[in-house]
Image (spheres, rainbow, N blue to C red):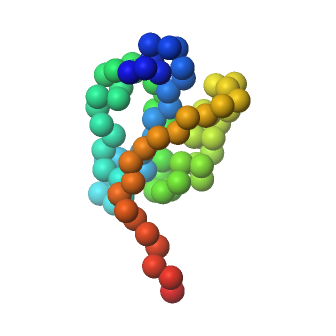
């Protein structure tokens, strides 16, 4: 993983990855195999990581001013009521 080799902080997160109601499923184990120093922040059902205070705190703790964010989308959409 390029980030690990370049000593770039890696933060991973998933919304209820092991819970019965988890919308996103488990995190790919290869991520932490290739970036063993990565910080994992579990979420308690929030779809957006930015709605989780622990994730925001972890990002701020890196002290970095630039963020490269990536991920997968399961196509979850909220229907208008």
30 shown above or below 22: above
Residue positioned 51% across, 86% down in the render: 81
The number of discs equals 0
Query: Residue at the spot x=70%, y=29% of the render?
Result: 65
Q: Classify residue 13 by image quadrant.
A: top left
Q: Nearer the viewer, residue 69 or 35?
A: 69
Q: Position of residue 34 (x, y in %)?
A: 34, 21
Image: 29 above or below 34: below
- The x, y position of residue 10, in whole percent, is 50, 27
Can residue 16 be seen in the rendering of this structure?
A: no
Q: Is residue 23 left or right of residue 60?
A: left
Q: In the image, residue 32 lies at what x, y percent?
A: 36, 26
Residue closer to the observer: 15 or 78: 78
- Regarding residue 13, the answer to whether it shows in the image is yes
Residue sitting at 59 percent across and 49 percent down? 50
Vertical relation: 69 (above or below) 1 = below
**61 sits to left or right of 4:** right
- Left or right: 59 with respect to 24? right
- Tell me the quarter of the picture where residue 12 sits: top left
Position of the N terminus, as image quadrant, is top left
Q: Is residue 45 left or right of residue 9?
A: left
**What residue sits 57% from the left and 40% below the top?**
55
Q: How far from the left and from the top, in percent, is residue 78?
A: 46, 73
């Amino acid at each position: 993983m390029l980030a690990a080799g370049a000593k770039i902080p890696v933060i991973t997160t998933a919304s209820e990855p092991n819970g019965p109601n988890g919308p996103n499923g488990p995190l790919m184990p290869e991520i932490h195999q290739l970036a063993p120093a990565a910080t994992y922040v579990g979420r308690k059902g929030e779809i957006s990581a930015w709605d989780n205070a622990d994730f925001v705190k972890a990002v701020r703790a890196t002290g970095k001013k630039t963020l490269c964010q990536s991920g997968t989308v399961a196509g979850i959409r909220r229907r208008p009521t």
